[in-house]
């Protein structure tokens, strides 16, 4: 794989799903290590199988997490802590000031010595790798190839240090989007450097699996939730519906498989705890149209039906992207609420005047 001169590693919390739903959160390594209380402002799903005390049935006791301060990563950290897992994470300047239970470590994934020293020190049983390249042109950035190398080196060193459970985030961008629903057996023909890199990493890292080492590769589809940028599809719809604006920037007939970010985090931790193996789609299995999503938001906000027009929007190449979640259901995981319920709650909590009041408090 060709070498490039990459920028400093950044970590992405919501990884795997192509825009516009990728709630990216760029963060950089820092130079120290500390343990602080983990405190985030968004509400998390409460897992009915956990009570905050140590789960005696866990196949691992200590986990090392990359991307722990990102859109998805912070939710995964909370889920692990709720199960009583000893959580260690790569340190960044955006690490929260109060984070009980998380031990932060300076990790430079470009440096083999740094990777060895951190993993040897932590001696974790589980590795959750959510970090990846971020940037405006991340889909076609040459850095994607370098992140495959860094991620593989991380996984291999983790196993050399005695680690036994690996979870790395994959993406629906690995698939050929010509048909729906997309199962784990559907053709993988990515049309971006990002999708190709994820596909390559997933194939290589699964070679580490054996009788003692489990490797699970959750393929994330489209996420939404607190902390997502206002320019993303769901927050943009909420803003336009609340203001009574015409939604003319996206095709109303477009269908995408959305899942609340806290549900995705719960699914990721469930797969890790269940010692699942191989690729698993992490999605809702439903793909409502943009028009249907806007109507749910309007009902939640007590607004009239949204005005929608797609005259100026080019016809999308792939009208529907939806996951087949049969394998996820067979493994025993189901979301705690429907996408409609989660979206309505998210819309009410993020109505523009509500956000202004919250920001001032």
Image (spheres, rainbow, N blue to C red):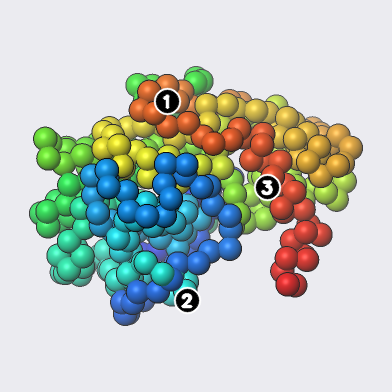
Residue 270: x percent and y percent?
A: 37, 40
- CB under 8 Å between discs 1 and 3: no
Dot 2: element: loop
Q: Position of residue 140 (x, y in %)?
A: 43, 48
Inter-mark Cα distance, 2 to 3: 26 Å
> On the rendered structure, is 120 left or right of 287?
left
Local crowd at mark 2 within 10 Å, few (<14), some, or many (≥20)?
Answer: few
Q: Is residue 350 above or below residue 337?
A: below
Q: In this rendered view, identify the residue nearer to me: 306 or 97.
A: 97
User: Helix, strand or loop at disc 3?
Assistant: helix
Residue 333: quadrant of the picture: top left
Quadrant hosting residue 93: bottom left
User: Mark 1 to mark 3: distance in Å?
Assistant: 25 Å
**Residue at 16% from the left image edge and 41% from the top image edge:** 213
Give the mark, 2 or 1, whose residue is nearer the N terminus: 2
Q: Considering depth in this image, is 180 or 338 the residue closer to the camera?
A: 338
Residue visible at 40% across and 60% down in the picture: 68
Residue shown at 50% from the left, 60% from the top: 25
Q: Residue at x 68, y 28 (%)?
A: 289
Q: Mark 3, residues whose alpha carbon is within 10 Å: few (<14), some, or many (≥20)?
A: many
- Up the image or down, 121 lies above or below 51; here it is below
**Mark earlier in primary sequence (2, 3):** 2
Secondary structure at badge 1 equals: helix
Question: Between marks 2 and 1, how big is the CA–CA gap?
Answer: 37 Å
Q: Is residue 16 left or right of residue 136?
A: left
Q: Which residue was labeled with disc 2? A: 97
Say if mark 2 contacts mark 3, CB within 8 Å. no
Query: Which residue in the structure is indicated by mark 3?
Result: 346
Q: Is residue 358 visible?
A: yes
For label 1, the residue is 329
Residue found at the far bottom of this picture: 32
């Amino acid at each position: 794989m060709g070498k490039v001169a990459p920028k400093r590693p950044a970590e992405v919390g919501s990884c795997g799903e192509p825009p516009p739903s990728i709630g990216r959160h760029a963060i950089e390594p820092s130079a120290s290590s500390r343990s602080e209380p983990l405190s985030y402002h968004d509400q998390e799903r409460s897992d009915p199988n956990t009570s905050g005390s140590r789960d005696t049935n866990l196949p691992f006791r200590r986990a090392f997490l990359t991307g722990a301060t990102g859109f998805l990563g912070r939710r995964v950290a909370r889920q692990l802590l709720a199960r009583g897992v000893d959580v260690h994470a790569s340190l960044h300047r955006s690490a929260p000031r109060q984070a009980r239970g998380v031990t932060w470590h300076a990790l430079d994934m470009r440096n083999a010595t740094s990777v060895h020293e951190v993993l040897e020190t932590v001696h974790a049983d589980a590795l959750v790798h959510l970090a990846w390249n971020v940037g405006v042109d991340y889909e076609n950035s040459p850095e994607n190839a370098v992140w495959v190398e860094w991620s593989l080196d991380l996984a291999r060193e983790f196993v050399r240090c005695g680690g036994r459970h690996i979870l790395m985030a994959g993406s629906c961008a690995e698939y050929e989007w010509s048909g729906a629903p997309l199962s784990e057996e559907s053709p993988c023909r990515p049309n971006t450097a990002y999708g190709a890199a994820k596909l390559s990493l997933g194939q290589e890292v699964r070679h580490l699996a054996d009788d003692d080492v489990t490797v699970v590769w959750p393929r994330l589809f489209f996420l939404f939730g607190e902390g997502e940028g206002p320019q993303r599809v769901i927050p943009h719809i909420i803003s336009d519906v609340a203001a009574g604006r015409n939604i003319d920037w996206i095709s109303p007939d477009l269908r995408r498989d959305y899942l609340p970010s806290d549900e995705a985090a719960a699914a990721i931790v469930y797969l890790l705890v269940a010692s699942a193996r191989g690729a698993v789609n992490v999605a809702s299995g439903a793909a409502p149209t943009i028009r249907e999503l806007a109507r749910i938001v309007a009902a939640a906000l007590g607004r009239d039906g949204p005005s929608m027009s797609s005259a100026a929007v080019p016809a999308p190449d792939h009208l529907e992207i939806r996951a087949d979640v049969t394998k996820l259901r067979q493994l025993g995981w189901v979301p705690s609420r429907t996408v409609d319920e989660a979206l309505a709650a998210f819309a009410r909590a993020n109505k523009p005047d509500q956000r202004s009041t919250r920001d001032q408090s």
